[in-house]
Amino acid sequence: MKICCLGAGYVGGPTMAMIAYKCPDITVTVADINEARINAWNSDELPVFEPGLDDVVSAARGRNLFFTTDKNKAIKEADIIFVSVGTPTKTYGSGAGKAADLKYIELCARDIAEFSEGPKIVVEKSTLPVRTAEGLKTVLKANSRPGLEFQVLSNPEFLAEGTAIDDLNDPDRVLIGGEEETEAGRKAIATLVDVYANWVPRERILTTNLWSSELSKLVANAFLAQRISSINSISALCERTEANVDQVAYAIGQDSRIGPKFLKASVGFGGSCFQKDILNLVYLCEHFGLPDVAAYWEQVIIMNDWQKRRFSQKIVNTLFNTVNGKRIAMLGFAFKKDTNDTRETAAMYVGRDLLDEQAVLAIHDPKVSPDQIFYDLKEKPTDAEGKPNKQIEICEDPYVATQKAHGLAILTEWDSFKDLDFEKIYENMYKPAFVFDGRNILDHEKLRKIGFEVFAIGR
Ligand code: UDX
Ligand code: UDX
Ligand code: ADP
């Protein structure tokens, strides 16, 4: 059997690497139009940082895992084609800011129709609005020729970044949606089930109709994000009262109906999925004439935006209502620990707010590149004359970032931050020295003993 995947990003790359690793009899080819990305996948510096990914890739690459820019050949040879290209939120025209932009998906469908020479199973792996499969099917059918037959499946990915390899290795469930009502549809579903059954127990492989599968992905992310917005809303109430949000989260999480996960109050959720998928859900509800349902889910985003803004305002208010010319050390820029991904990271919004207030940012992140940080902050490393940016310094060393800073803000929960020498940091900061722990990961009692003024989320 031969599998190909269009799109070698955060989803396509690790997922295909795991399939190849677990199924030595299947040849897996990952194709991308971005040559630099493919070169990186073929090098020792993979374009995606994920704990454990290097080992999986090096075990399978060259054996039955291949990365290429020749998508036409990959399409031609494959029995199963995964479509895992980006589906960003539309920035133009109708649905701008909410609907998913499906142009990359449609281009893939046209390529598949053009270069196929036999029957194919086409699997949507990207997160897509409900009923995208319909569009895919229509394009494929309209461009079909005798001898070609396309079956479309939905197989949403539930991996989280930073734990992608564990999530792929031992998933809570695998979801496969298809045309349950036809013989050909059931056969296609069974073919994909067999691929996953190489390592996932059968009872964890769920099959549904296409629309349930597509919708489940959006709803899973909406529910997860909603938990974070809910606890973050309560964090604000805790700050006004004597309650401690971590104690509240623990207490409610012990109720087995609520459960303990995804109740960590924070500076706000980020990542490529939560906001995009909820906006998508909101757009769908509006489209289907359900404005009250749309408004309900939109509130999750509104609360998240408020939480990010609240954090930057807290910094400004605490530093005597001005951060103009003051150095603020930002520790962490990725949207969560153990990833180099910054899409929708709260740090980007907090950073931009502080730049608007004319602060000087000294930013340290163990994995995010300086170029990425400048890009996200909509700034340039140097001015027209080549002089370094006066408002932003990227520091490889957290001790350099905090030197002569008025405030230190934790934006990402990297484990390494917990073990920093805070006595040394304190000595080198301006006094009063403020800590804003946007992730509640530091030992606040200890920091107060050293002399810091500490502000946390929900305490
Ligand atoms: C609730 C809390 O569960 C309990 O912990 C607290 O101490 C008191 O309030 P109660 O109101 O007795 O308990 O019943 P509960 O089982 O929570 O149901 C409340 C309502 O929600 C009922 O009308 C029930 O039919 C409805 N419900 C519950 C649903 O519609 N769907 C569900 O999945 C669960
Ligand atoms: C998410 C879903 O978890 C995953 O199933 C889906 O396939 C893709 O979207 P991801 O965005 O990679 O995964 O990371 P996740 O661990 O869900 O975290 C998302 C954001 O929520 C991060 O910014 C994280 O810091 C934040 N978060 C998470 C909290 O603020 N509190 C929590 O309790 C959990
Ligand atoms: P995700 O997080 O969903 O994996 P990414 O943006 O990380 O999203 O990856 C999507 C990848 O899809 C990018 O590397 C992009 O170059 C690639 N891509 C976009 N269009 C096509 C296409 N028509 N054929 C192959 N790859 C494509």
Image (cartoon, rainbow, N blue to C red):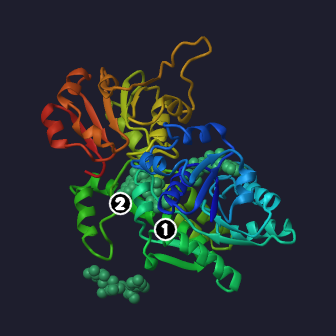
Q: Residue at x 28, y 75 (%)?
A: 256
Q: Position of residue 387 (x, y in %)?
A: 54, 12
Kind of residue sitting beneath label 2? Ile
Instruction: Report the front residue among 159 and 425.
Output: 159
Q: Is mark 1 within 8 Å of ligand 2?
A: yes
Q: Is residue 270 visible?
A: no
- Tell me the mark number nearer the camera, choosing from 2 and 1: 1
| Mark nearer the N terminus (2 vs 1) | 1
Where is 350 relative to 327, above or below? below
Where is 201 relative to 354, above or below? below
Q: Residue at x 62, y 52 (%)?
A: 30
In this image, 368 relative to 91: left or right? Answer: left
Label 1: state its secondary structure: helix
Q: Position of residue 355 (x, y in %)?
A: 48, 30
Instruction: Report the front residue among 236 and 420.
Output: 420
| Residue wearing tag 2 | 231
In the picture, the disc for residue 340 is: none
Q: Residue at x 42, y 55 (%)?
A: 165
| Residue wearing tag 1 | 220
Kind of residue sitting beneath label 1? Ala
Q: Is mark 2 within 8 Å of ligand 2?
A: yes
Q: Are marks 2 and 1 in contact (CB under 8 Å)?
A: no
Q: Position of residue 436 (x, y in %)?
A: 30, 39
Instruction: Report the front residue among 394 and 142.
Output: 142
Label 2: state its secondary structure: helix
In this image, 371 relative to 428: left or right? Answer: right
Where is 409 relative to 60, above or below? above
Where is 30 relative to 176, above or below? above
Marks 2 and 1 sit apart, C-alpha to C-alpha, by 17 Å
Instruction: Report the front residue among 339 and 167.
Output: 167
